[in-house]
Image (cartoon, rainbow, N blue to C red):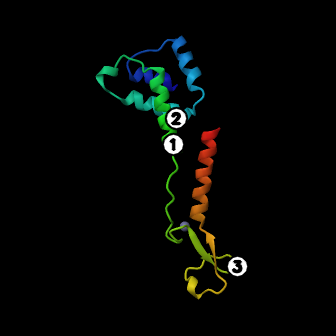
Amino acid sequence: MALLDLAEARATSVSERGLERYLASLAAFDLRDVVTATLQLGEEESQEFRGVFPQLGTIIARTRQAQAERTKPKPWVPCGRCTAEGYVFVNAEGVVCDDPSSVPNRRLRECECKTVWRAARDAARLDTAA
Ligand SMILES: [Zn+2]
């Protein structure tokens, strides 16, 4: 349980009532982000924080930060086979041509690396919206 681990890391305890209140507020967030936030807060060794359980607002702010970090769109990087815009030349059969200038009836198709990247990005967006 992330909150109890955090209490232990801070060398303090949290009441059951307090825990319930925290959990009710944090339930709206993705558990992965809450765990990331509480781990970060627990690792901050600053002496002033020892014996003090972080305020709910602090945990929420860190959880939002973790969520933003996790869902931030990662830039697409060309795989090396495609153009800077993410296209490859394919022949009439749809097979990628390594030497397009010699292939008649070639056409551009989006490279697989970009298709996969776009799908991952869209999935992360849906994840955030849920
Ligand atoms: Zn590519």
Q: CA distance from mark 1 to mark 3?
A: 39 Å
Disc 2 marks which residue? Answer: 33
Residue under the image location 54 percent in, 44 percent down: 71
Q: Which residue position holds label 1?
A: 70
In this view, which residue lies farthest toward the right? 93
Residue 51 position by quadrant? top left
Label 1 sits on what residue type?
Arg
- Inspect the image, locate mark 2, and give the three-letter code of the amino acid beneath it: Asp
Q: Answer whether labels 3 and 2 touch (C-beta < 8 Å).
A: no
Mark closer to the chain start, 2 or 1: 2
The image shows residue 17 at horizontal and vertical percentages of 54, 11
Residues at marks 2 and 1 touching, judged by CB atoms closer than 8 Å: yes
Residue 5 in the image: state x and y as whole percent: 46, 24
> Mark 3 highlights which residue?
93
SS category of the residue bearing label 1: helix
Helix, strand or loop for disc 2? helix
Q: Quadrant of residue 118?
A: bottom right
Q: Position of residue 103 (x, y in %)?
A: 62, 86
Q: How many marks?
A: 3
Question: Is the residue 61 above or below the residue 87 in the image?
Answer: above
Mark 3 or mark 2: name the one nearer the start of the chain.
2
Please give left or right for residue 84 compared with residue 97 in the image: left
Locate residue 2, reporting x and y percent. 50, 26
Secondary structure of the residue carrying tag 3 is loop
Q: Is residue 78 above or below residue 130?
A: below
The quarter of the image that holds ligand 1 is bottom right
Label 2 and label 1: CA atoms lie apart by 8 Å
